[in-house]
Image (spheres, rainbow, N blue to C red):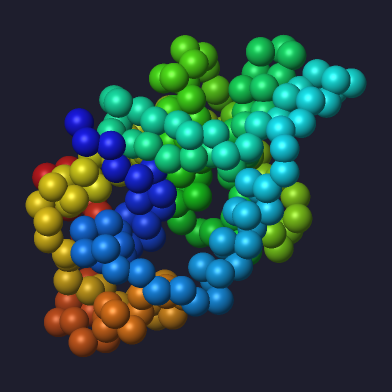
Amino acid sequence: MELLPLSGLQHYLYCPRQFALIHVEQQWAENQFTAEGNVMHEKAHSGADEHRVGEGVKITRSIPVKSEEMGLSGQCDIVEFHKSGDVIPVEYKRGKPKDHSADEVQLCAQAMCLEEMLGCTIPLGYLFYGKRKRRTPIELNEQLRQLTRRTAEAFHHLFASGETPEAVYESRKCGACSLVEICQPKLSKQSNRSAAAWFDKAAYD
């Protein structure tokens, strides 16, 4: 199976058309939100690995990961290796927790890649949000893992099709999207169709 960018999971769950514009059509544009996100990731990736002897933990940055099973490759912002044997991925995000599961799925996919590479089990990870300036613990349960697998399957299907879904206008999402001028969602004849319905159809077809 071809390895696709792990970051595409988040793009796909946010909006399948956004995923296709970025990963199929190779289009990109910056806005305030993407710029702030880039700064967050640069801070997470910068600096040397750390050994906190007193805490029994090694902190590593920018670890490349992949999963042959899910067809994903990417990079973890931070992975903590604890003396106890625990392996904990930490993903940095701008803003605050969202009302959808895109961030959680991206973190879960990182953990599943690490599990496949290291032969371990990772029950917990963290999302660090810039506005809150603290970690949010994420339980990597079976429900989240199933959503992660379904999303990977669906976006592989969309990528292989080479097609870009029609735009689905949702004011909140579209207003925050850096590709809104490229996408032109208000011009779509499907502007009254929900993105959730599109995902459900694609995931189970």
Percent coordinates x, y for residue 189 in the rendering: 14, 82
Question: Is residue 176 left or right of 41 when viewed as pictured?
Answer: left
- Residue drawn at (36%, 75%) of the image: 179
| Image quarter in which the C terminus is found | top left
| Image quarter in which the N terminus is found | top left
- Residue drawn at (17%, 65%) of the image: 165
Q: Is residue 86 above or below residue 6?
A: above
Question: Is residue 20 left or right of 84 when viewed as pictured?
Answer: left
Question: Is residue 55 left or right of 63 when viewed as pictured?
Answer: right
Q: How many marks?
A: 0
Q: Is residue 136 above or below residue 28?
A: above
Q: Nearer the viewer, residue 25 or 139?
A: 25
Question: Is residue 60 left or right of 152 when viewed as pictured?
Answer: right
Q: Nearer the viewer, residue 129 or 25?
A: 25
Q: Is residue 152 visible?
A: yes
Q: Is residue 195 visible?
A: no
Q: Residue furthest bottom?
A: 187
> Looking at the rendering, which quadrant does residue 33 occupy?
bottom right
Q: Is residue 67 above or below residue 161?
A: above
> Looking at the rendering, which quadrant does residue 154 occupy?
top left
- Residue drawn at (66%, 13%) of the image: 85
Q: Nearer the viewer, residue 160 or 102?
A: 160
> Looking at the rendering, which quadrant does residue 40 occupy?
bottom right
Percent coordinates x, y for residue 90 in the rendering: 62, 39
- Residue drawn at (89%, 21%) of the image: 54
Percent coordinates x, y for residue 128 in the rendering: 66, 49
